[in-house]
Image (cartoon, rainbow, N blue to C red):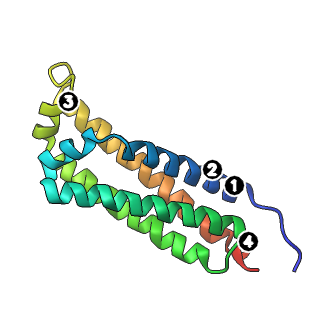
Amino acid sequence: MEKQKKPISIVLIIIWMFIAAFSLLIKQFNFERIDTNAKFLGEILSIANYTFDWIILGIFIIFIFMFFKRKEQVNKFFIFFILFLILGDLIGFTLGFLNIKEIEQTTLYSQEIPQSFLIIVSVISFIINLIIYLLIIYFTKKHKKYFSQ
């Protein structure tokens, strides 16, 4: 079978994976995040969250290589991974919403930023992430022939 050209949406998904992996790697070196998460989740869950982010980073790297190699069936696993990320964002959004008072107290500009603003920004951010994830799922499914060798 002749090797077909990468669809632009697959290229954009690969670029998104690079950006997501890089930002997650940078975020991993912010050790203050563990202390902040410990206030909301407890120490054990904070360390588990930190460790879990390293695992997700590794999975991103594996998917980047698998997308370049055009491994068969990678699109199905990738879609489940994106659904898992959506679930993680939903849980994070819910925990953030439930702990809005604590978040407001730890924010540097908590006196200057009204609580309603934090909620609105969180909701908009969640909706944008959800739209991006759904577009990634759509284009991954649309170009499933690209992954068959």
Residue drawn at (12%, 32%), measured in percent from left and top?
105
Q: CA distance from mark 3 to mark 1?
A: 37 Å
Q: Which residue is mark 2?
A: 15
Judging depth in this view, the residue of 121 and 37 nearest the camera is 37
Q: CA distance from mark 3 to mark 4?
A: 45 Å
Residue 6, position in %: x, y?
Answer: 77, 61
Residue 56, position in %: x, y?
Answer: 42, 61
Q: Which residue is mark 3?
A: 107
Mark 3 Cα shell of 10 Å, populated few (<14), some (14-19), many (≥20): few
> Which amino acid does the dot numbered 1 rest on?
Val
Q: CA distance from mark 4 to mark 1?
A: 12 Å
First in residue order: circle 4 vs circle 1: 1
Q: Which residue is mark 1?
A: 11
| Residue 138 seen in render | no
Q: Which residue is mark 4?
A: 146
First in residue order: circle 3 vs circle 1: 1
| Residue 147 seen in render | yes
Say if 14 sits above or below 76 in the image. Answer: above
In the current view of this chain or complex, which residue is farthest to the right? Answer: 2
* Left or right: 67 as drawn, with respect to 86: right
Mark 1 Cα shell of 10 Å, populated few (<14), some (14-19), many (≥20): few
